[in-house]
Image (cartoon, rainbow, N blue to C red):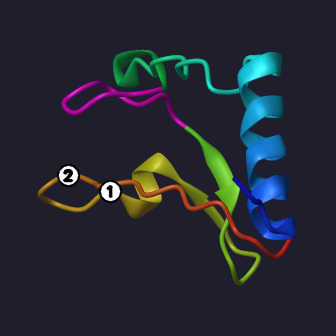
Amino acid sequence: MKLNVKQFALAGFFSFIAATGLSAERQRIVVAELGPQVGETVPNFKLSDQFGETQTLDSVMGPNGLMLLFHRSADW
């Protein structure tokens, strides 16, 4: 059986993964432990928005409640 360079490199890569245990199962993430959950009371906060204005929980709360979305920017 004759292997070309790409096949040989690929076989070596998979051998490396098997030997180092990189193919092990990933740890499960328990979402309930990540932060506030739906219906939970959020502690009061004071943060700057994208315009530099200070916002608090009371200043952003509407008559029907509030939905907070935290987005990690790739520009930091």
| Residue 70 sits above or below residue 48 on the image | above
Identify the residue at horizontal 77%, vertical 60% (top origin).
3
Q: Which residues are magenta?
A: 35-44
Give, as a three-letter code, the residue at label 2: Gly
| Residue 25 sits above or below residue 3 on the image | above
Horizontal and vertical percent position of residue 17: 75, 31
Residue to which mark 1 is pinned: 61
Horizontal and vertical percent position of residue 11: 75, 46
Number of numbered labels in the structure image: 2
Q: Residues within 10 Å of mark 1 (few under 14, many from 20)?
A: few
- Disc 1 vs disc 2: Cβ atoms closer than 8 Å? yes
Q: Is residue 48 magenta?
A: no
Q: Quadrant of residue 59?
A: bottom left
Horizontal and vertical percent position of residue 49: 66, 71
Q: Which mark is residue 69?
A: none
Magenta residues, dominant SS class:
loop
Which of the two residues, 17 or 41, is positioned nearer the viewer here?
17
Please indicate whether residue 48 sits to the left or right of residue 29 in the image.
right
Horizontal and vertical percent position of residue 7: 74, 61
Identify the residue at horizontal 77%, vertical 32% (top origin).
15
| Residue 3 sits above or below residue 33 on the image | below
Secondary structure found at label 1 = loop
Identify the residue at horizontal 40%, vertical 17% (top origin).
30
Give, as a three-letter code, the residue at label 1: Met
Quadrant (top left/top right/bottom left/bottom right) for the C terminus:
bottom right
Please indicate whether residue 27 sits to the left or right of residue 63 in the image.
right
Q: Residues within 10 Å of mark 2 (few under 14, many from 20)?
A: few
Secondary structure found at label 2 = loop
Give the Cα separation between the discs numbered 1 and 2.
Answer: 6 Å
Residue to which mark 2 is pinned: 65
